[in-house]
Image (tube, rainbow, N blue to C red):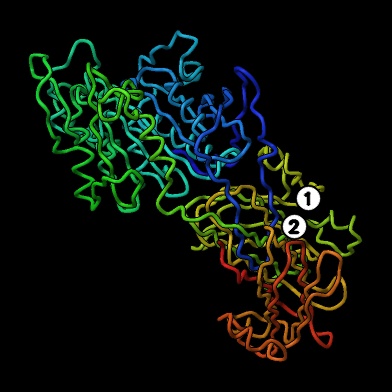
Amino acid sequence: MWKWEDKNSLVPQSIPIHKERSGVVRGRRILPLLAFVAVILINVSTPAATASSTLSYEKYGTTSTGVDLYWTAYVPSDGLRHPAVIVLHPGGYKAGAAGPLNVAEDLGNAGFLGLAVEYRLAPPHDPMDSPTHPVPGQNDVSPVDDGHYPEQTDDVQLAIRTARADPRCNGLVYCVGGSAGGSHTAYMATTGIAGDDMPDLVAIFSCGVSNLFDPNLWPLVCNDTETCPSEAIANYLNITNSFPLPPSGSGLATAQAASPITHIHPGMPPMFILCSDKDSLGIPTSTGVSINSYNTDGTIGPLEIGTNGLIPNLLLGGYSESTLNVPVADTFKKAIVPVLGHSHAFEYWSSPFDGIAGHPTVATTVINWLKAGPPSSGTLPTKDLVNVSTRTDVLGGDSVLIGGFIITGHVAKTVVLRGLGPSLASSGVTGFLADPTLELYDSTNILVAQNDNWGFPLPDYVITGGLIPKNPAESLIATTLRPGSYTVVLRGANDSAGVALFELYDVDAVDSEISNLSTRGRAENGDQGSMIGGFIVGGTEPTAVLVRAIGPSLTNYGIVGALPDPVLEIRNSEGSLVGLNDNWRSNQQQQIINTGIPPSNDKESAIVSTLAPGNYTALVYGAHSSQGIALVEVYNLTPSN
């Protein structure tokens, strides 16, 4: 499977077909953050429809073997962020160009970022010699990429992650797939991680096979005009001990691993599962939907209900069937589309959903279901509380700078962390840290990323956002993180000391929040000895905040040399004093208690204030010229609307 670290630098490269897409750089939102901050991001709502979408052929990534992967993007022309919908094509795992393009175009015109995705195909890679071959160069690497499992699902996984981080996407990614593409869609829904490579909603058209080891599937008599499912699966899985019997041994293990039903678990996205009433062989037992199947003589048989496919296993896994026209958590929606002749996968996209001419089509019904959004998406927030930076003196031992933050919600978030030292000289700072290093840890104290001395290549959002450090000795981490708790440590290389600046930038506006962000460092006295935390109140309305300066209570956590008596100041962008406190009970005592998070030591400081949108600075220093390690925190007290 793809390693998450490999995706951080993948940004789609646009190759125009009709005309260049517009609004990409304008749509990018780069917000610097820091201190203990509840950051509420403003997402862009999806309009009911857009008049048109622009078309662009783009590279969305490169495989570990060097094969470039592409999608055809239909981008709403309003320049806003929208949910991305990945369209996965049918073709028996071995054939077919990206798309169908008309499906992706309809999605783009309906207000989604429609992405018709190409991925590696199993032999014979039909149509390998065509200019429209889905993956140019698949046979041009050594050893040749054969497209067997899990290469195709790896490519889809990469597409989901790249789409989620795309500046045109609001962080939500849906998948719609037909036949083999439907199998891949189900696979990502059952194996993915929420907010990462798991789609937020899925629609499956004539799911190719969700149970690849189903013994009822393998001995089927195949229709000459179609790819026999057992043959297609054996080819896809590279199983040689299977056909015409069910796989065994290592082949069975591979078939089980590649089967979506193997991985059904709580917390998967809502599913819309469709087929036509004249879908083809292999589908009943594989999908678990009532459809027609072939008799042994090749004629179309009666309606059947699968017993070992996706729907029965969803029911066994605790999921229920929904009849509502909007996605519901822990449910699937089932539909059988009446058609006049054989119609498979996206072939019935434009057919009437109920089979009655002039009634709403399958496309309209599925698009409206997707527009309703994930059941947990909720109301969009309307305020920002964003931190910029913290500057402090960095020494060895406990006197390093430590930043902690939490990503909440269900969507992964892309961030940029910077550790600056030498470039502070241009701001008049003396005694700067000559060689800062950064380390990023998750909640289990596992090292996620580290950097000493940034270098190229850098992701596009770092370059276009103006986030490249000015000095090569400074550090930078650009990464996309799943929801959870993280800790950043800024220290000097070889235990060097000096004044350093730590920055955390949010570079997307997805449906998740960076909250509970704190910074611990050394505070002394005087201009350069103060610990300085900067934050931004965004939005258009005032936001109530609680700012705390913690010192003595740090000894309860084993910190040696804690600041015994911190003083806290808040100043606005003009330098005017907004609030001052030494010993929190001396002023606003009841207001601070009412927040539910008063400091635990009377010597510590806190300020409650309602601040207009703008830039603010929190300064922490020691009373009576004291010095030591302190913690500066900023809490957002105004709930998102």
Amino acid carrying mark 1 in the image: Ala
At which x and y percent is residue 196?
A: 47, 46
User: For the point 18% across and 22% down, which residue is it?
Assistant: 281
Tags 2 and 1 touching, CB below 8 Å: yes
Along the line of sight, which residue is nearer the eye, 540 or 321?
540
* Quarter containing the C terminus: bottom right
In the displayed structure, would residue 629 be above or below residue 485?
A: below
Amino acid carrying mark 2 in the image: Pro
User: For the point 34% across and 20% down, which residue is it?
Assistant: 91
Question: Is residue 362 in view?
Answer: yes
At which x and y percent is residue 609?
A: 70, 75
Residue designated by label 2: 436
For mark 2, does the 10 Å Cα neighbourhood hold few (<14), some (14 to 19), or many (20 or more) residues?
many
Q: Return the mark for residue 473.
A: 1
Q: Is residue 598 left or right of residue 356?
A: right
Along the line of sight, which residue is nearer the eye, 358 or 293?
358
Along the line of sight, which residue is nearer the eye, 526 or 615?
615
In the displayed structure, would residue 477 be above or below residue 135?
A: below
Numbered disc 2: secondary structure? strand
Whole-number angstrom distance, CA of label 2 to CA of label 1: 7 Å
Q: Is residue 599 left or right of residue 191?
A: right
* Quarter containing the N terminus: top left
Question: Is residue 190 in view?
Answer: no
Mark toward the start of the polypeptide (2 vs 1): 2
